[in-house]
Image: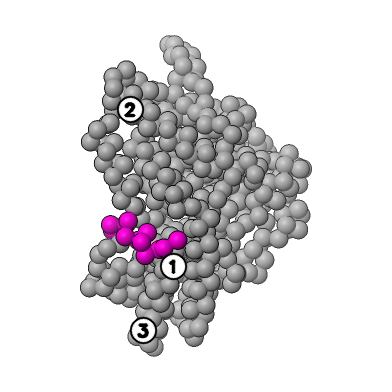
Amino acid sequence: MNAELIKEQFPILNQEINGHPLVYLDSAATSQKPRAVLEALQRYYELDNANVHRGVHTLGSRATDAYEGAREKVARFIGAARTEEIIFTRGTTTSLNLVASSYGPSAVSAGDEIVITPMEHHSNLIPWQQLAKRTGAVLKYIPLQPDGNIALADVKKTVTDKTKIVATSYVSNVLGVVNPVKEIAEIAHRHGAVMVVDGAQSTPHMKVNVRELDCDFYAFSGHKMCAPTGIGVLYGKKHLLESMEPVEFGGEMIDDVGLYESTWKELPWKFEGGTPIIAGAVGLGAAIDFLEEIGLDEIHRHETKLAAYAIGRLSEIEGITVYGPREREVGLVTFNLLDVHPHDVATVLDAQGIAIRAGHHCCQPLMRWLQASATARASLYLYNTEQDIDRLAEALIQTKEYFA
């Protein structure tokens, strides 16, 4: 793939920041949007804007076709068996909270175990903390290896017959490790537990097949994979979703409403109360088309190559600590520079037109494990090049000299 040509399809990247050409290295927080997605959103609002599933007029029919067509694309994109296993949400956080709030109370009782890892984003940690508090369950953590990886031997020691839920990220948003979720799911199922996967950092960057992973729930966000903000997905195995109760009630998700009792629509609509995120779904469908045209395998190869180059360049700079394993499959490098606070590093880089992330990345327990209050993070995507990394390395050398 030609990253330079791909970059031309992202209008926002063709600008200067503080007098320098923009180098955007914060795609793990949110990716930029290609022209194809922007145009799809504009077409929807200009030509098809209407509510879905309700009106019999032409605009309503076209909007419904676009909305449900996006659901079909998502199901194919992640290898789901059925479109009704795809629930549209506001994002990964909402999806994981839906599992914890709807499935969790019926599956977990006092003394049961919920197993997660110390590397989880807060959105895949706090919902399980709250569920454990409400039910009296025990929250357990799979320990990390010194490089941040998970050892299956530790998973086997941590997951027991008392475990009801195992929840892990597929890819860490700090360490860049790819967790063995297929093998973890196998261990979880052996003990009768369900497997919940946070796919926010995996879905944009590599091929995902939920049936091959055999996970029970899988959550991801559109805005990290070239789609608009405010649209996400929860995949769930059909029999589990059918057993769950909605957590939001109102229009659209009902079958029949009486004065004292109501019944719900079938999947997936029983979890999509109110006017859904129609334009977001349209944009997500366009983003999937865009990514599939390039090829997820091509994107993965490009990022793996960039990650190796970035780790090599940054490791050459004296005083930089790079966190996580040296070998990695996703374009994400987290680091610190000497005793300079990451916010100061990010501010100096921004003055040179380079956008990175600085802070705890919604992973405070992991920061404590790293013995760092915060870190800097450069995250790469399909529109980044080795020249972008060279700009980053040169700017970090200047930053180091400035603070010295």
| Local secondary structure at mark 2 | helix
In space, the residues marked 1 and 2 are separated at their CA atoms by: 40 Å
- Mark 1: amino acid: Ala
Q: Which residue is at a point 58% across and 66% down the rendered structure image?
A: 328
Q: In this image, 28 relative to 9: left or right?
A: right
Residue nearest the viewer, comparing 209 with 262? 209
Which circle, 2 or 3, is nearer the viewer? Answer: 2
- Residue 343 location, x and y as percent? 38, 71
Q: Which residue is at a point 64% across and 51% down the rendered structure image?
A: 181
Q: In this image, 369 relative to 20: left or right?
A: right
- Mark 3: amino acid: Gln
The quadrant of the image that shows the C terminus is bottom left
Which of the 4 image quadrants contains residue 106?
top right
From where the camera sits, is residue 380 visible?
yes
Q: In this image, 210 relative to 258: left or right?
A: right
Would you name the residue on which mark 3 appears?
Answer: 398
Q: Which residue is at a point 49% across and 52% down the rendered structure image?
A: 295
- Mark 2: amino acid: Arg
Precedes in sequence: disc 1 or disc 2: 2
Residue nearest the viewer, comparing 185 with 20? 20
The quadrant of the image that shows the N terminus is bottom left
Would you name the residue on which mark 1 appears?
Answer: 378
Question: How many marks can you see?
Answer: 3
Precedes in sequence: disc 2 or disc 3: 2
| Local secondary structure at mark 3 | helix
- Residue 145 location, x and y as percent? 67, 66
Q: Which mark is residue 62?
A: 2
Which span is picked out in magenta? 1-12
